[in-house]
Amino acid sequence: MELTNTVFLNMAIGLFFSILFLQSGLDKVFDFKGNSGYIKSVFEKTPLKNISSLLFITITILEISAGAFSLSGVFYYYFKGSLQLLTFGLQLSALSLLGLFFGQRISKDYAGAASLVAYFLLAVFGLYVVG
């Protein structure tokens, strides 16, 4: 496959999300107790307090899946020319970001929620480019 600007852009966006979500998701796995405790404290005074552990596990699975599909999608795209896995990785990335955004808004961490907007826009742009 020739490394055109479009090919490079697709791969760079995929690599970005693979790094972002594999690091974040695996950090949650390897420090499960610490991260889980933090999430419980964040949602302690919200309507989500009783399901914060379930939400934490869900977002962890979403993040690892988004990162893994984004990374495998980059390689699959480069060697096979198909954008299917990369597209799915970017869709999972957008869903993960929406979940994180929702949680930060509910917990009234408005600055944290605002910082996710750029990531979400990149995910949507990436879907546009691969579409």
Image (cartoon, helix red, strand yellow):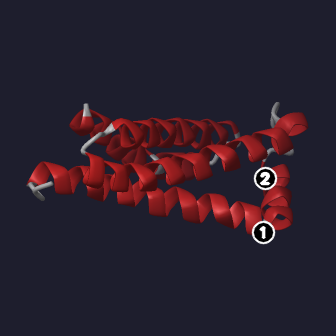
Could you tell whether 97 is left or right of 71 in the image? Answer: right
Dot 1: what SS?
A: loop
- Outermost right residue: 50
Residue that carries the numbered disc 1 in the rendered image: 31
Q: Is residue 58 above or below residue 7?
A: above
- Outermost front residue: 80
Q: Residue at x 9, y 55 (%)?
A: 4
Distance CA(mark 1)–CA(mark 2)? 12 Å
Count the marks: how many? 2
Q: Residue at x 37, y 37 (%)?
A: 87
Residue that carries the numbered disc 2 in the rendered image: 39
Q: Residue 79 at x, y = what percent? A: 28, 54
- Quadrant the C terminus occupies: top left
What's the amino acid at mark 1? Asp
Label 2 packing within 10 angstroms: few (<14), some (14-19), many (20+): some
Foreground of the two, 46 or 60? 60
Q: Residue 5 at x, y = what percent? A: 10, 54
Could you tell whether 59 is left or right of 35 in the image? Answer: left
